[in-house]
Image (cartoon, rainbow, N blue to C red):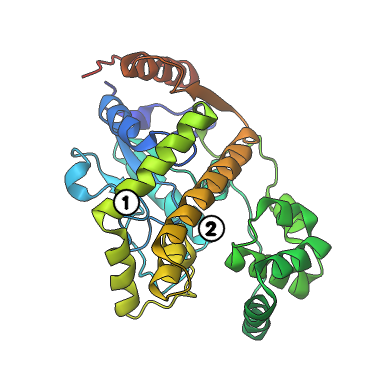
Amino acid sequence: MLTNWNQEVDVDGRPPLLVLVGPTAVGKTALSLKLAKALNAEVISGDSMQVYKRMDIGTAKLLPDDREGVPHHLIDIREPEYPFSVSEFQQLCGEAIADIHGRGKLPFIVGGTGLYVESVCYGFRFQDIGSDERFREEMRAFAQSEGAQALHDRLNAVDPVTAAKLHPNDEGRIIRALEVFRLTGIPLSDSQDQSRGDDKASPYRLCIIGLTMDREELYRRIDARVDGMLEEGLVEEVSSLLRDGVPREAVAMRGLGYKEIAAYLAGETDYDEAVRLLKRDTRHFAKRQLSWFRHMKGLEWVDVGDGSKNSDVFKRICDIIAGKFHIDIEYIWT
C-alpha cells in the first residue's frame, strides 16, 4: 500500500486523482471502501444529492458508522432548502483534492453525477449567467397548468440537445435551460460546449474507472434497492423533511425518491403507483448515467456482473490503477 501519494506527481506537477463512476445500484460504494483502504485514499462524494443533510435513505448515503474508517468528503454539507450547483461542487472538490493530496493521501471521487465529476476531471469553466426568478415562476405555473411534457416541448423547440438529455419530469433543469436561453439567447448545450475548454488538458493525473453490468441485472438491482429504501423508512424520511418545512419545489426534493413519495404523501397518487414511478424513473436515470459516462474521455470500463468473483474484479481494477499511475500495488481481497 502506498503511504505517501504527494510524491506521485508527473513532470507538470499534476497530482493523481482516482475516479470511480457508474450507474446507480451497480456497486460503487462497496467497492470504493475496498479500494480506499488498499490505496490509502480518501473518498470525495461525486453525488449531487448526498450533499444534503437529513436526506440519507433516498440518496443511498453511506453513514459514518458504515464507512469502515475511510474519510469521506462533500457529504452532509448543505441544508435541503438550499440549492447546490455544479460550480460550487467543482470549487469544493478542488479544495478537497488539494487537501487530501497535501496530506499524502490519494483523492478518490466516487459517484454517479456525470456533469459534477467531469467538471472536476477536465476543469470545465462555468459562466455566471445569472437568474430571472419571475421567469422561473412563470415556467412553474406553465408546467402546473399545461403539464410536464408541454414544458419539455418548449425546451425542445429552442435547445433540442439539452432536451434530449432531460426527462420531462426534471422540471428544475428544464426551467434552468429555458432560463439560460432567455437570458443569453444561446442554448445551454452551446454554453456548456464553450465552457469545456480543452478536455485533454486535465489538471490531474487521471485514472477513471466505470462500472457496468448487464442491463437486466442492473434493473433487478435497482428494483431491489428501491424496495430496500422503502423498508428502511423512505416514506418517513420524506415526511419528516416536509414537516420540517422543506418545500416540495426545493431542488433537493425534486430528486429521485423524494418527488415520488412527496406526491404520494400529498394524495396525488397512491402508494403502489408512487413505487412504480420511482422504479421506472430510477431505471431511466441509470440509462442517462450510462449514456453520459460513455462519452467521458479516458474512462476504463469494468464489467462487474459478468460472473467474475469480487476478488477478480478488485484485482482487475487494481491492475488498471497501477498501469495508469505507473506504480506497484499490493492488494489483498478480504
Asked whether 58 or 2 is in front, the reply is 58
Q: Which residue is depicted at the point 18% across and 39% down?
A: 69
Q: Considering the image in quadrants, where does the N terminus appear?
A: top left
Q: Considering the image in quadrants, where does the C terminus appear?
A: top left
Q: Is residue 209 above or below residue 231?
A: above
Give the quarter of the image for residue 318: top left
In three-dimensional space, the C-alpha distance between marks 2 and 1, rounded to whole angstroms, equals 26 Å
Badge 1 is on which residue? 229
**Mark 2–mark 1 contact, CB under 8 Å?**
no
* Mark 2 secondary-structure assignment: helix
Badge 2 is on which residue? 86
Residue 324: give x, y in percent of width and height.
Answer: 49, 20
Asked whether 237 or 98 is in front, the reply is 237
Residue 312: give x, y in percent of width and height.
Answer: 36, 13
User: Can see residue 206?
Assistant: no
Label located before the other in sequence (2 or 1): 2
Give the quarter of the image for residue 221: top left
Residue 289: give x, y in percent of width and height.
Answer: 56, 42
Disc 1 marks which amino acid? Met
Residue occupying the far bottom of the picture: 134
* Mark 1 secondary-structure assignment: helix
Q: Which residue is depicted at the point 67% across and 78% down?
A: 139
Disc 2 marks which amino acid? Val
Q: Residues within 10 Å of mark 1 (few under 14, many from 20)?
A: some
Residue 168: give x, y in percent of width and height.
Answer: 65, 61
Q: Which residue is depicted at the point 49% across and 68% down?
A: 251
Give the quarter of the image for residue 293: top right
